[in-house]
């Protein structure tokens, strides 16, 4: 999914058939100034083969990516991919162990790959949790995404806009899309809501406001508290001091499959309510 608002610093996912474990395997390659692109691993995908010590992968996932292990062991492929990713284009490790990107004038202690894969883990877990609660599997290529730049590294990150209401704010609890490092965003600032394949943005009475870009001008307008409006592919959103771009899919059915239990439940509900 290319970013329409941040040039070529984007994250792209390419869907392949799901593995027997219900995951999407990823490898990575880099392109553009400071970009990291993530795509599924497979024969000929990125030329990466795994021969990593499982304990090293486990410790990296738990310690560096913040994975809730062993409960999220099904997502350890993210930690494995993180350890095999090269540095994004424009990044280098200096003699002091710091990672720098001279073009972006960025210097940090943490591996840029950790930032990208920690974001990937959080979003894949959020999606998996909803899938588990609904007994369904979402078609990843049909989900809208909110594209943002990490404030400390300028790496491109994403957040799924899942079906229903996605609360946006800087609180660590009770919020779906969290921007905890924002200085101006409210704890429960606003929301993005997906209904019938359309996305709406709303403000829940934030202190510093929610703004949306207007086509074709570059100006933005402020949403009134309690109001919502539909937003479209490539549209700029500003939650206080945090800029983001909505990336909408080309279309298609969001639900890929129902679990056997969910399908059985729906059939029984239909038998009870449908006339003979």
Image (cartoon, rainbow, N blue to C red):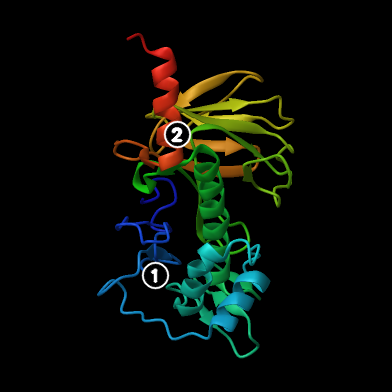
Q: Quadrant of residue 252?
A: top left
Residue under the point 63% across and 38% down: 168
Q: Quadrant of residue 191?
A: top right
Closer to viewer: mark 1 or mark 2: 1
Give the left or right position of residue 235, taking residue 68 as reference. left
Near-viewer residue (58 or 158): 58
- In the displayed structure, 64 sits above or below 177; it is below
Near-viewer residue (148 or 261): 261
Give the left or right position of residue 197, taking residue 155 as reference. left
* Quadrant of image for the C terminus: top left
The circle drawn on residue 28 is 1
Q: Which residue is mark 2?
A: 218
Residue 144 can be seen, yes or no? no
Q: How many marks?
A: 2
Residue under the point 49% across and 85% down: 52
Question: What crowding class fits label 1: few (fewer than 14 Cα within 10 Å), some (14-19), or many (20 or more)?
Answer: many
Residue at the left extreme of this rendering? 44
Q: Position of residue 218 (x, y in %)?
A: 45, 34
Residue at the front extreme of this rendering? 276
- In the displayed structure, 163 sits above or below 99; it is above
Quote the CA–CA distance across marks 1 and 2: 33 Å
Residue 118 can be seen, yes or no? yes
Q: Position of residue 111 (x, y in %)?
A: 58, 75
Near-viewer residue (100 or 147): 147
What SS does tag 2 mark? loop
Residue under the point 51% across and 49% down: 128
Residue under the point 32% across and 55% down: 15
Residue at the top extreme of this rendering? 275
């Amino acid at each position: 999914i290319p970013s329409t608002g941040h040039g070529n610093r984007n994250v792209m996912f390419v869907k392949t058939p799901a593995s027997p474990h219900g995951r999407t395997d990823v490898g990575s390659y880099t392109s553009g100034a400071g970009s990291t692109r993530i795509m599924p691993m497979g024969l000929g995908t990125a030329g990466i083969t795994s021969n990593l010590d499982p304990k090293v992968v486990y410790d990296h996932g738990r310690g560096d990516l913040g994975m809730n292990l062993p409960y999220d062991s099904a997502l350890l492929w993210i930690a494995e991919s993180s350890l095999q990713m090269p540095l994004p284009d424009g990044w280098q490790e200096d003699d002091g162990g710091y990672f720098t990107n001279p073009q972006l004038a960025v210097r940090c202690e943490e591996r840029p790959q950790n930032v990208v894969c920690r974001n990937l883990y959080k979003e894949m877990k959020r999606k998996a949790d909803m899938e588990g609660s609904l007994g369904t599997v979402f078609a990843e290529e049909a989900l809208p995404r909110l594209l943002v730049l990490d404030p400390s590294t300028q790496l491109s990150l994403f957040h799924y806009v899942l079906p229903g209401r996605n609360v946006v704010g800087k609180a660590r609890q009770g919020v779906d899309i969290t921007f905890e490092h924002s200085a101006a965003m409210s704890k429960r600032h606003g929301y993005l809501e997906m209904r019938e394949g359309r996305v709406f943005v709303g403000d829940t009475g934030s202190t510093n406001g929610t703004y949306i870009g207007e086509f074709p001008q570059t100006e933005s307008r402020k949403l009134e508290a309690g109001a919502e409006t539909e937003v479209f592919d490539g549209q700029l959103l500003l939650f206080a001091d945090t800029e983001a771009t909505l990336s909408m899919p080309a279309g298609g059915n969001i639900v890929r499959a129902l679990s056997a239990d969910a399908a059985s439940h729906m059939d029984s509900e239909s038998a009870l309510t449908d006339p003979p």
